[in-house]
Image (tube, rainbow, N blue to C red):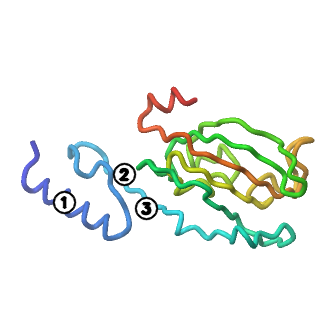
Amino acid sequence: MTTMKQQIFLLTLLLLSAANGFVTPSATSSTRQHVIMQPIISSSSLKLGSFDEYSQTDPDQDLAYEDTLVGTTDGVAMEGKFVTVAYKGQLMSNKKVFDEGQISFRLGDNKVIKGWDRGLIGMKVGGKRVLKIPPQLAYGDRGAGDVIPGGAHLQFDCELKGIASNAMEEKMAE
């Protein structure tokens, strides 16, 4: 049982965190737990390029995306979340498909190309999104073996299949 002083402290911390754009998932639980504050990340805060005006010749081209289907569930992909994504990747230069399948990973852990870590943020489970990714957010000038040449612009058709809500779900998705 918490004392009135502890409850006021937690309430003040929660209010201050919310005012500064942070959420505190454990602020309302036991006072013995550590409070972890994470910035709120939304897809609207990313500096993304225009999907229709994407240019393969512009060296400063940024990531661009288009939602072809907005998901219907409450789960939203954000940095730190463990996601499962079905995808098809192709070279933008000739539309050649170089890979397709399903993968599970934690967003922001640098386990996938940067274009994925940035481009999947804000998706809802069940949603479909097309990513156009410039080389600097993909495989750069080195490429990837014989499949993806250096300097390649990539397009991925992605579907967010799920977001794990606990460690057991993460293990099952691996």
**Residue placed at 55% from the left, 40% from the top?**
161
Q: Secondary structure at mark 1?
A: helix
Q: Label 2 near label 3: C-beta < 8 Å?
A: no
Single out the mark in the foreground, 1 or 3: 3
Q: Is residue 29 left or right of residue 156?
A: left
Q: Earlier in the sequence, mark 2 or mark 1?
A: 1
Neighbour tally class for label 1: few under 14, some 14-19, many 20 plus, Cα within 10 Å: some
**Residue placed at 55% from the left, 56% from the top?**
121
Q: Nearer the viewer, residue 29 or 152?
A: 152
Residue 7 position by quadrant: bottom left
Looking at the picture, which amino acid does disc 3 mark? Answer: Ile
**Residue placed at 86% from the left, 56% from the top?**
152
Residue 155 position by quadrant: bottom right
Q: Nearer the viewer, residue 135 or 68?
A: 68
Neighbour tally class for label 2: few under 14, some 14-19, many 20 plus, Cα within 10 Å: few
Looking at the picture, which amino acid does disc 1 mark? Answer: Leu
Which residue in the structure is indicated by mark 1? 11
Which residue in the structure is indicated by mark 2? 36
Which residue in the structure is indicated by mark 3? 40
Q: Secondary structure at mark 2?
A: loop
Q: Secondary structure at mark 3?
A: loop
